[in-house]
Amino acid sequence: MFRKTLAEIALLVGGRVVGDTSIVITGISGIKEAKGGDLTFLANPKYLPLAADTGASAILVGNDVLIEGKPVIQTDNPSFAFSKVLGLIKEYTTPKLMGIHPSAVVHPEAVLGEGVGLGPHVVVEKDARIGRNTVICAGTYIGTKTVLGDNCLIYPNVTVREEVIIGNNVIIHSGTVVGSDGFGYAQVGDIHVKIPQMGTVVIEDDVEIGACVTIDRARFDKTLIGQGTKIDNLVQIAHNVQIGKNCILIAFAGIAGSATIGDNAIIAGQVGVAGHVSVGSRAVVAAQSGITKDVPAGTMMFGTPAEEYKAATRVLAHMKRLPRYAQELKELREKIQLLEEKLGKSS
Amino acid sequence: MFRKTLAEIALLVGGRVVGDTSIVITGISGIKEAKGGDLTFLANPKYLPLAADTGASAILVGNDVLIEGKPVIQTDNPSFAFSKVLGLIKEYTTPKLMGIHPSAVVHPEAVLGEGVGLGPHVVVEKDARIGRNTVICAGTYIGTKTVLGDNCLIYPNVTVREEVIIGNNVIIHSGTVVGSDGFGYAQVGDIHVKIPQMGTVVIEDDVEIGACVTIDRARFDKTLIGQGTKIDNLVQIAHNVQIGKNCILIAFAGIAGSATIGDNAIIAGQVGVAGHVSVGSRAVVAAQSGITKDVPAGTMMFGTPAEEYKAATRVLAHMKRLPRYAQELKELREKIQLLEEKLGKSS
Amino acid sequence: MFRKTLAEIALLVGGRVVGDTSIVITGISGIKEAKGGDLTFLANPKYLPLAADTGASAILVGNDVLIEGKPVIQTDNPSFAFSKVLGLIKEYTTPKLMGIHPSAVVHPEAVLGEGVGLGPHVVVEKDARIGRNTVICAGTYIGTKTVLGDNCLIYPNVTVREEVIIGNNVIIHSGTVVGSDGFGYAQVGDIHVKIPQMGTVVIEDDVEIGACVTIDRARFDKTLIGQGTKIDNLVQIAHNVQIGKNCILIAFAGIAGSATIGDNAIIAGQVGVAGHVSVGSRAVVAAQSGITKDVPAGTMMFGTPAEEYKAATRVLAHMKRLPRYAQELKELREKIQLLEEKLGKSS
């Protein structure tokens, strides 16, 4: 069971206790649900009124925050500090998959690093290489010549096709498919003739990929997911897409063939990015937008087809007033008619 | 083989035969495809002209409907009555999965209720509990400490992660993932640091979940799917979302983190609901809309960002007339110029 | 290893070498990435400037194209010719799955054609029939009475439910679900009562289906995917949908129940087609559009709700000018007020 004093936790997160340092924490929780023994956190000042009433034994807060009647640990980034404590507790509570389950099918010419765990019914094909301490859960398929780095965690029922290259510390959630054929055909009359997809997918270190994501292999060369990028559930990455480092892609984002996403970009939910388009680094694309042309670095975009965010929202504001504008147009027309009649008479 | 008289079927559905009660029904079909021996149904009066010409031997109709030259069974709700007959036939024709397939991997500390069926290559982890008469089909994964109720039907290649709680009579279709990690990171400089997702998913009784749906586990506490809610294919439910009872969510609907959907709400296809937003009970969100703010109970919404349906469609109607408005604006400008010139001369 | 002269390749693709016919090709690549020994291709004249600088040993080009200092093979359709060469190389490099893996579970009453390959943990249920030389990869499930034609390739972790009919030369990518229940309920008060889905799915010859696609079985009768149609990843096809021949459906396209798509139609990414709607043959629906009414053959559509493309883009162009129109409206109002005042005085 997890059991740490506030002093120990402050040490772990690099924070400072204000209050009784000997209080014992045995769990964590949200500010509303917390009870005695729990540690909670306050990242958003808007929840300050809830902090006084929380059942938690202590609160992780920002450097300048005090809660009357509650012990706190002050840190630079309470959200990050909290995630460190969460990680510690998760280690205590999650049993690690160890060893190779007898029902796993591992090709004799596959290479497994030290400490690899393979769940039931896992398949590892010929010449695949699995790095040290990587865990592959039940029913997952690893194709021929595919390489996984160290300390990866691949959840159940994932499919990684042949010749894919995956770095270290990569997490892939269930139902996801990496290395499916790109969607490419040559048109001959009305017939679509399949263009074999000879390339691969490269996933760099520290990437996390959600559930039921599809990442297609390149026509040739590679589809690339840059280091530290995090992909939500049900995202589509087409062939030859190049995604930079530390990007965020939210559910139902679809990136069409050969598009490029720069480092630290954010692609929100249900966004479509057209083929061969380039989205600059630190660009932000708002939900449900459709990107049809290159986006400069650092720009926020919105709409279908997307425009720069402020211009797009200005147009939206005017759109809502359209019924009023139409009415005004009618009134002006009548006034002009009156003026014309009057002027006709007066002249 | 299925074989029932109209009299027997009328008894089953609580209806009244008008015509020969001894006619024998051996199958069911749509009104256009039906042939002799089939029962069909007429729910929408718009298809009345097809009814006279159907090859079916009899028709399930509303209480006040007669079809010349065709035996009918009149009921309050012909669509529901038809589904009852369908269910009966399905029972006759679908063999039930019985027993535990020898290739299934069941942890010795998992608990299986009476009458549980496990298909080939199913995995049931430690301390999982499966209720009576629940059927789990080939290749499906049930994680540690996960609980399934009675009479559930889990189709092939489903993934239910650890510590998930599922009620009775729940149906989950293939490729679906329940309990994947919520998409949560703490930002430290440019790096996204994973926040462990310590909560779970609770799915109440009588829920049906389509194929390739993703339902993330909560950061802490639970993601909730209320009793009787029906979820179509390829829907995304993020962490800590709370969905009420008897809701309908259509394909590609995406519900972002901590959003709340009230009872009996309908979320149509390709709709996005932003994080922390609340959609009231009996609200209806039209297809492809984007919900960015709270929706009052019983309200119909449309657009991106969504507005109340009538206001949104009024704006749309004006939008279509924009080319005409622009032309009128130009004409008024010219008329005013003429007036100005005239008035300048005349004054 | 692949090794062919330009003369041999020209013969294969029905083209004409301009330059040294004895040059040996050992691989293929994109025009930018190519190196010595590679063949590349030039389909789009916009990349002509790259052609002179490519590291490739030869280039596949159109009939009238010459590249100074580079051997070329001229053909009618360089993109198609290139795909032929790709196919040849793929055959050299891809080992074919042969035989039945001992961990596959095949019902004794299933029928396997000559040359069928079944990967580890494949399940083939009772009365299923698999055609000659069809390959079914690891973890894939084939349901009771389902029929697959000859020369199909079903990738790992696919689910094909019971009684589905699949033609010859069909490719299905990982994570895809064919034959899940249609989303149909009869409303009884607030309760949604499941309507059993008794129909099936029919997939004709030469269809390719991407990863994590969902195709629901019909209520009765069949959901149909016509010959030669190609479906991208994460597409949803609802029950009773009828899709014609040689159609293209891009990622996140959602086709609602009983909709009809004509031959050679193109449905772009994130498009929604409403239930019971008919899209004509050779129609093109632009990305993110929402089709709410029938689309005539050959028409291009855009927007939500979608309109004919030119009308829709004309409205869009006016929308962008809304801030200017609003300003003009304001100016006209002021001018009219001045005129009214002037005329009031002058009269």
Image (cartoon, coloured by chain):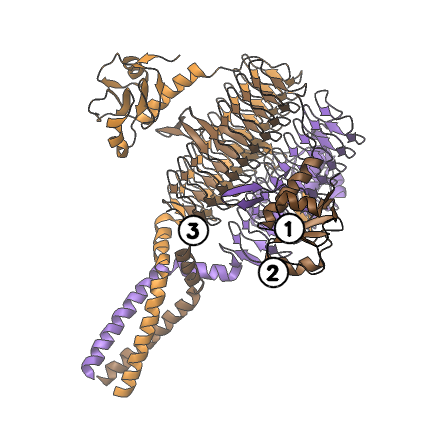
Chain colours: A orange, B brown, C purple
Give the amino acid type for the residue marked by disc 3 in the picture.
Answer: Met
Q: Is disc 3 placed on a helix, strand or loop?
A: strand
Q: Nearer the viewer, residue A51 or C298?
A: A51
Quarter of the image where the C terminus of chain A is located: bottom left
Labels in figure, total: 3
Tag in front: 3 or 2? 3
Identify the residue at image location x=66%, y=39%.
Answer: B88
Chain for mark 1? B
Numbered tag placed on residue B300 in the rendering: 3
Q: Is disc 1 placed on a helix, strand or loop?
A: strand
Chain for mark 3? B
Q: Is residue B145 above or below residue B93?
A: above
Q: Is residue C91 left or right of residue B205?
A: right
Crowdedness near tag 2: few (<14), some (14–19) or many (≥20) residues, C-alpha within 10 Å = some
Task: Give the percent coordinates (x, y) of residue B32.
Answer: 69, 54
Crowdedness near tag 3: few (<14), some (14–19) or many (≥20) residues, C-alpha within 10 Å = some
Find residue A215 and report its image quarter. top right
Give the amino acid type for the residue marked by disc 2 in the picture.
Answer: Pro
- State yes or no: discs 1 and 3 in contact (Cβ < 8 Å): no
Q: Nearer the viewer, residue C73 or B333?
A: B333
Find residue A329 and report its image quarter. bottom left
Marks 1 and 2 sit apart, C-alpha to C-alpha, by 44 Å
Q: Is disc 2 placed on a helix, strand or loop?
A: loop
Task: Give the percent coordinates (x, y) of residue B128.
Answer: 53, 19
Numbered tag placed on residue B235 in the rendering: none
Whether residue A143 is visible, yes or no, is yes
Report which residue position mark 1 lands on: B16
Q: Are marks 1 and 2 on the same chain?
A: no
Report which residue position mark 2 lands on: C296
Q: Earlier in the sequence, mark 1 or mark 3?
A: 1
Whether residue C86 is visible, yes or no, is no
Give the amino acid type for the residue marked by disc 1 in the picture.
Answer: Arg
